[in-house]
Amino acid sequence: MSTGPKQALFAEFATIGRALGNAHRIEMLEHLAQGERGVDALAQRVGLSVANTSQHLQHLRRAGLVTSRRDGKFILYRLSDDSVTGLLRTLFELGERNLTGVDYVLRGYFEDRDNMEPITREALLERSRSGQVTVLDLRPEDEFAAGHLPGAVNIPLEELEARLAELPDGCEVIAYCRGRYCVLSFEAVATLRAKGIKARRLEEGMPEWRAAGLPVEYV
Amino acid sequence: MSTGPKQALFAEFATIGRALGNAHRIEMLEHLAQGERGVDALAQRVGLSVANTSQHLQHLRRAGLVTSRRDGKFILYRLSDDSVTGLLRTLFELGERNLTGVDYVLRGYFEDRDNMEPITREALLERSRSGQVTVLDLRPEDEFAAGHLPGAVNIPLEELEARLAELPDGCEVIAYCRGRYCVLSFEAVATLRAKGIKARRLEEGMPEWRAAGLPVEYV
DNA sequence: GCTACAATCAATAAGTCGCTTGAATGTTAT
DNA sequence: ATAACATTCAAGCGACTTATTGATTGTAGC
């Protein structure tokens, strides 16, 4: 009926919605939440062609979710705003609460999700003060270098089995990675338990930790 | 590349994004944030055919954003969760900050947005305690009846010019409606000022007021 | 039962999205 | 300059989305 300013505004907001309406783009946002990246690097991580990745990124930019800057040959993209992480988090929480499909996937893939019961940030802080735990970061080295939890050990998931010896004995391992739904830590916990090592997942990942204003280490 | 659980999860979350990726659906959500509605009633308010509205609503339901219940001949839809309002709000804030188009629309339509400078909830609470202001609700009567600001006067926008006499003299009018971007209050402020009445907009609308846990009147 | 009405379904046409391919632009290093 | 590389553009294809139409299901009231 009326096609006034309200419709025009909502049409604008809808472009943000559409930008979030694709699994690849959400995955890209999760990666960019770790730090800025070039197109090629991102393309590799999400397993898409460079041209395709570039188009997705422009889609995200049109929606105001990412910005870019040139650095020599590279064009580096990053989240345009800390609140993008917040938007993603709200999206995830809502999905986990109201979408049956989410629960289905989580249960289907990680049979015993009950045993996977994650530990919260607060609980981790408390327990790490008394030195009872080893904090394990499963992301690639460059993401680890761009900021990680204080005192965390970095072993990228692919190398975990080969480098089990680096983990101190008798300590419970708390694994974390990119975010709430990043699978690295899920797989790590499964691997560790199969080897008889006590392990649990941290509820959330690096961006949420950062967003909560908790200390970040760059060593 | 890998099409693991992460991709499956993100695909689920993307359905929420797609649901938000259409201006009509966002408008529907804003209406449903006022209270539950039948398909026909909603269709009229957003100016779409019933069949089309029904399809949009099913889209929203698939995304877990709305639920429905049967009441006699009617099927009433409502937001499935208070956090949907929160998601919308985050979306709006992000858009207002990062989308040039939003600013363009706001400026283009309401030439002197500076004069429109809205008043915050807190400021309204403070000033209304000393009785200096008239709070004006511009929504249709049924939405007013489903909950409104304490002490508010209800004059639907279409009737405003005819019912100016109902407003007390010498009092500044604070106008509000469905939400941050609902135009009713914008138009009302313009109308009132043209008549020489001091008027300002409340920054946000009913759902945000409710979400903030502030008192709601049902008289 | 039959009628009236609310809502959904099914089929369609026009438009948009997502991915691929190959060419074009822009920057660095030789 | 020229070569090498990162990124973007442009065209094209198949798949999905949106709005319309008319038929269908389900409920209330006679």
Image (cartoon, coloured by chain):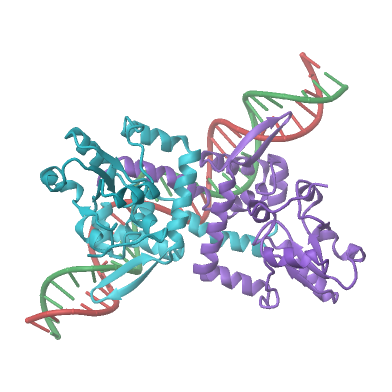
Chain colours: A purple, B cyan, C green, D red
Identify which residue is drawn at 80% across, 61% down.
A136
In which image quadrant can residue A58 be found? Answer: top right
Left or right of residue A92: residue A157: right
Location of residue B146 in the rendering, given as x and y in whole percent from the top left corner: 27, 64
Residue A104, can we see it?
Answer: yes
Identify which residue is drawn at 44% across, 53% down.
B88
Residue B48, can we see it?
Answer: no
Locate the C terminus of chain B and report the quarter of the image it occupies.
Answer: bottom left
Location of residue B50 in the rendering, given as x and y in whole percent from the top left corner: 26, 60
**Residue farthest right in this picture:** A165
User: In the depicted view, which residue is nearer to us: A154 or B190?
Assistant: B190
Locate the N terminus of chain B and report the quarter of the image it occupies.
Answer: bottom right
User: In the depicted view, which residue is nearer to us: C10 or B115?
Assistant: B115
Count of picture labels: 0
Left or right of residue D5: residue B196: left
Identify which residue is drawn at 53% across, 40% down.
A64
Left or right of residue C18: residue A12: left
Location of residue B196 in the rendering, given as x and y in whole percent from the top left corner: 18, 33
User: In the depicted view, which residue is nearer to us: B79 or A37?
Assistant: B79
In which image quadrant can residue A197 be found? Answer: bottom right
Location of residue B7 in the rendering, given as x and y in whole percent from the top left corner: 63, 60
